[in-house]
Amino acid sequence: MQQERRPIYRTPSSAPQPRKDSTTYKKMSRKEVWVALTALVTALLLIVFFESHHRGGHASPVVNKSPQQSQSTPTTPSFDKKQYSLTDPTSIWVIVNKKRPLSPKNYAPADLTATDLPQRVPGNETMQMRSITASALTQLFSGAKAAGFNLMIASGYRSFSYQTNLYNGYVASIGQAEADKTSARPGYSEHQSGFAVDLEATTRKCELDACFGDTPEGQWIAANAYKYGFIIRYPKDKIGVTGYDYEPWHVRYVGLPLAAEMHNQNTETLEEFFGVVGGAGYSS
Ligand SMILES: [Zn+2]
């Protein structure tokens, strides 16, 4: 799914010009004023021209760009892909997939927290998440509400033991091959990190179903999640990369800078962005 490339955090290309003191005008002749204004307009036109020419259709990462830089240096700063660990389970950039289990496999976050947000199973442990995820999700829900959409948490944190029961249940009913397409093995679920949340509309329409992506709520999430530091972790047609079918309801907190950078680069998955292995088969 192509997402609109919309630069964010961009500062206006021309800062408001300081207002000239009226006494300055009085001391200047008409000709001087005219020359000064012409020079000012020419400079502004040049700035606008170079800015728009430079932008021309290229997604330019603008995160970390200070207002000063945006005027003086048109080159795009490189995004530091080593700011956070990709393996430490406490890192907001940890990549969990079928080749990369959490380490240790029975990891549990130390700061799990409940939220005041609408929940499918109110008060249940599986509605919890890490506190940083909860803060960001609360803002996302506010944004959705302001746009007229009422969201609900369908699933948050899943412990190693919960995932063990869930996975074993699938294996018992549909066999291991099919279970591996549907449910993560214990230790391999992003939900165990406390950074992943399944969302749905309070109407429960298309609950945990691919059609959620076609609902107004699902479309709002797809278009706006990055503004709150989340990505749609399992996009369409990326099972060969992520190991999972399209899950428009499953968002993953990665922090604002990374979510914005991935959006600007139009890179949908963590595996592609960081160049790490993923895919459908388990490593062992
Ligand atoms: Zn999920």
Image (spheres, rainbow, N blue to C red):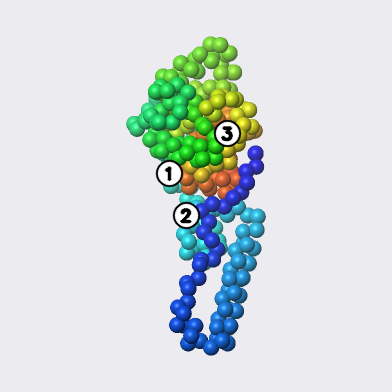
Q: Is residue 119 visible in the rendered structure shown here?
A: yes
Q: Is residue 56 left or right of residue 117?
A: right
* Mark earlier in primary sequence (2, 3): 2
Q: Is mark 3 within 8 Å of ligand 1?
A: no
Quickly name the residue at label 2: 64
* Mark earlier in primary sequence (3, 1): 1
Near-viewer residue (93 or 60): 60
Q: Residues within 10 Å of mark 2 (few under 14, many from 20)?
A: few
Quickly name the residue at label 3: 217
Q: Amino acid at mark 1?
A: Tyr
* Mark earlier in primary sequence (2, 1): 2
Q: How many marks?
A: 3
The quarter holding residue 262 reads top right
* Residue at 60% over, 63% down: 51
Quarter of the figure that contains the N terminus:
top right
Q: Secondary structure at mark 1?
A: loop
Return the x and y of residue 102 as percentages of the image width and height: 44, 30
Which of the numbered marks, if any, corresponds to residue 258?
A: none
Return the x and y of residue 240 as percentages of the image width and height: 62, 32
Q: Nearer the viewer, mark 2 or mark 1?
A: 2
Near-viewer residue (5 or 233): 5
Q: CA distance from mark 2 to mark 1?
A: 16 Å
Q: Is residue 253 visible in the rendered structure shown here?
A: no
Which of the numbered marks, if any, corresponds to residue 84?
A: 1
* Residue at 51% over, 44% down: 227
Near-viewer residue (151 or 190): 151
Return the x and y of residue 195 as percentages of the image width and height: 45, 34
Q: Amino acid at mark 3?
A: Glu
Q: CA distance from mark 2 to mark 3?
A: 30 Å
